């Protein structure tokens, strides 16, 4: 349809993308071979067939297993380059990408290998596509506060190239309050702060992310809609929500894509954005996520243009850089 082409052609920023979640099965096999790593799958088809999730934890188990093929700076550079090439084809002009250092350092991969590789991929995307990017270091919330502090310490030499910190992995049972002190420290170090909250966890976790972690942006945030006062507060404060429709569908956060709450979010005045989360696992890059919202028929071209505009407004680019994109 015309709306399809319109939406695909919109310039956009991607604000919620786990770089480890962009590892396509083909690359998983190639890296397994290159690094002589065993993987528990015989074919690309077998990997894809395993991507049937009933909740967040189901997905995370497979996602962490897949990351095991990533070993060298070259691997991280190739991973990032494949993502940026694909994002550029979707008219992504700027991307703020999450990485999970603990997934790698806990396997003996030095953080320098991870960051150097990602930075090389970022520099090449800027040269090749004019696509700019920033790095967001995520703490794994299923691990403890001490491990998060150690990760922040290990990242210290890289602070001038890291825009902010985030919080991801298993949400239920790991409330934002667990990381209040490490987020305070990150703030003192001049880092911006984001957190996954209200994906599977309750609206209370969103309150904690705001009040205890002092987040600059909210990742997912779906469950905020359960709390009218919270929704009003997020709307009033102009908080950006990084919403991920196909992820929500695959992880059973929503039962039906046509029932996705994106329209409610926009009508409530929330600064919602559309993102792909873990595109290799959830079956779509950013344009697939925008286009998945068309059939429900509840968003028009103006709404889609707003979502794309919100992605720049909610980015960590300077006001002048944002203005240059609008
Ligand atoms: N939620 C929590 N942790 C994650 C996700 C997610 O959607 N993707 C990668 N790590
Ligand atoms: Zn995520």
Image (spheres, rainbow, N blue to C red):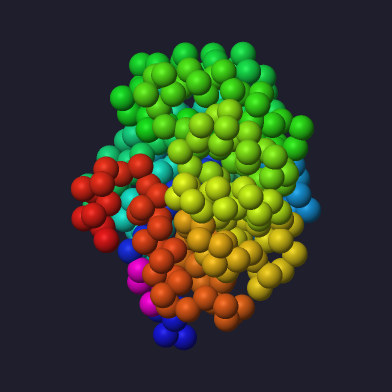
> Could you tell whether 59 is left or right of 281 in the image?
right
The residue drawn where x is 49% and y is 51% is 236
The residue drawn where x is 37% and y is 24% is 190
| Count of numbered circles in the view | 0
Q: Toward the viewer: 135 or 76? A: 135
Considering the whole magenta stretch, tell me its main secondary structure.
helix
Q: Quadrant of residue 297?
A: bottom right
The residue drawn where x is 23% and y is 54% is 323
> Could you tell whether 183 is left or right of 255 in the image?
left
* 272 shown above or below 318: below
Q: Toward the viewer: 112 or 309? A: 309
Query: In the rendering, at what x and y percent does residue 49 appear?
Result: 72, 58
The residue drawn where x is 54% and y is 19% is 182
* 238 shown above or below 152: below
Please check the rendered image and state whether residue 164 is part of the magenta-colored stretch, yes or no: no
Q: Toward the viewer: 18 or 73? A: 18
From which residue to which does the magenta span run? 6-10
Q: Quadrant of the C terminus?
A: bottom left
Query: In the rendering, at what x and y percent does residue 60 appear?
Result: 68, 41
Instruction: Tell me if residue 315 can be seen.
Output: yes
Ligand 1 lies in quarter: top right
Query: In the rendering, at what x and y percent does residue 210 appear?
Result: 56, 36
């Amino acid at each position: 349809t015309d709306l399809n082409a319109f939406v695909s052609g919109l310039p956009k920023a991607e604000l919620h993308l786990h770089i480890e979640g962009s590892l396509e099965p083909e690359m998983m096999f190639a890296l397994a071979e290159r690094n002589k790593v065993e993987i528990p799958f015989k074919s690309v088809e077998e990997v894809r067939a395993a991507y049937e999730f009933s909740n967040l934890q189901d997905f995370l188990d497979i996602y962490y297993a897949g990351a095991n093929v990533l070993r060298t700076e070259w691997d991280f550079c190739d991973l990032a380059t494949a993502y940026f090439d694909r994002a550029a084809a979707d008219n992504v002009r700027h991307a703020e990408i999450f990485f999970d250092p603990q997934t790698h350092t806990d396997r003996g991969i030095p953080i320098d290998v991870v960051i150097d590789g990602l930075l090389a991929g970022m520099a090449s995307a800027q040269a090749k596509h004019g696509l700019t990017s920033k790095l967001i270091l995520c703490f794994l919330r299923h691990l403890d506060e001490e491990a998060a502090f150690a990760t922040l310490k290990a990242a210290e030499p890289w602070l001038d190239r890291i825009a902010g910190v985030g919080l991801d992995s298993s949400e239920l049972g790991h409330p934002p309050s667990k990381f209040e002190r490490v987020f305070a420290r990150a703030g003192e170090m001049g880092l911006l702060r984001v957190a996954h909250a209200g994906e599977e966890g309750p609206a209370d976790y969103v309150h904690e992310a705001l009040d205890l972690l002092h987040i600059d942006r909210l990742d997912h945030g779906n469950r905020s809609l359960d709390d009218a006062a919270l929704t009003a507060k997020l709307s009033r404060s102009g908080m950006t929500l990084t919403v991920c429709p196909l992820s929500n569908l695959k992880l059973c956060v929503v039962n039906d894509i046509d029932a996705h709450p994106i329209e409610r979010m926009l009508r409530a005045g929330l600064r919602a954005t559309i993102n792909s989360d873990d595109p290799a696992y959830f079956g779509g890059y950013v344009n697939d996520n925008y286009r998945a919202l068309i059939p429900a028929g509840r968003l028009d071209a103006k709404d889609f243009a707003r979502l794309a505009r919100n992605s720049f407004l909610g980015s960590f680019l300077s006001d002048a850089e944002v203005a240059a994109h609008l």
